[in-house]
Amino acid sequence: MSKELEEGSVLSLDFTKLKKVADCGADVMPAVAQDVDTGEVLILGYANQLALDTARAEGMATFWSTSRNELWIKGKTSGDYLEIVEIRVNCEQNSLLYLVRPKGKGACHTKDSSGTARSGCYYRRLKADGTLEFVTGKE
């Protein structure tokens, strides 16, 4: 990913993401990780049966990486694990909600200006003029 995409103020939405997910060859569904204590939405990823089984067995938020086509236990390389408190399923049984407690410094792979992992991936808001700005306290 580019620094401008992840850190910049220019809106550059990837409306092709679901096509890429569909083309990855894995049967997946969206899986959202939400901080059980604050309600903050941390990450949107995808899970297949293996990811769900692993999340249940390990007690840590686990996803299927659609770009790498491999299991991804959040925090395994960064140390920023997301401990599962509860797993919920939506009414149509086509998405998962991981209610989690962060066990590291953050949940996002990007860092703030001080070099600390951000708490979650939703740290910018869309302004009326179409540009992005950091949410107060999230930079």
Image: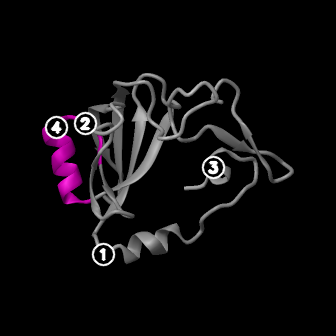
Spot the residue most to the left.
57
SS at mark 1 in the image:
loop
Query: What residue would you read off at disc 2?
Result: 60
Q: Is residue 58 above or below residue 22?
A: above
Q: Which residue is mark 3?
A: 3
Q: Nearer the viewer, residue 129 or 38?
A: 129
User: From which residue to which does the magenta span run?
Assistant: 48-62
Q: Magenta part mainly helix, strand or loop? A: helix
User: Do tag 2 and tag 4 residues touch (Cβ < 8 Å)?
Assistant: yes
The circle on residue 11 is: none
Residue at x-position 36% and y-position 35%? 78
Q: Which residue is mark 4?
A: 58
Q: Relative to residue 129, is residue 110 drawn left or right?
A: left
Q: Using a 10 Å C-alpha cutoff, classify the residue at mark 4 as few (fewer than 14 neighbours), some (14 to 19) or many (20 or more).
A: few
Q: Within the magenta stretch, is there residue 52? A: yes
Instruction: Tell me, yes or no, whether the highlighted magenta stretch contains residue 82.
Output: no
For marks 2 and 4, give the CA distance.
5 Å
Mark 3 to mark 4 CA distance (whole Å): 32 Å
* N-terminal label among 2 and 3: 3
Precedes in sequence: disc 3 or disc 1: 3
Q: Which residue is mark 1?
A: 25
Return the x and y of residue 107 as percentages of the image width and height: 44, 35
Residue 59 at x, y = what percent?
Answer: 20, 34
Amino acid under label 2?
Met
Which of disc 1 and disc 4 is earlier in sequence?
1
User: Which secondary structure, mark 2?
Assistant: loop
110 lies above or below 16: above
Q: Residues within 10 Å of mark 1 (few under 14, many from 20)?
A: few
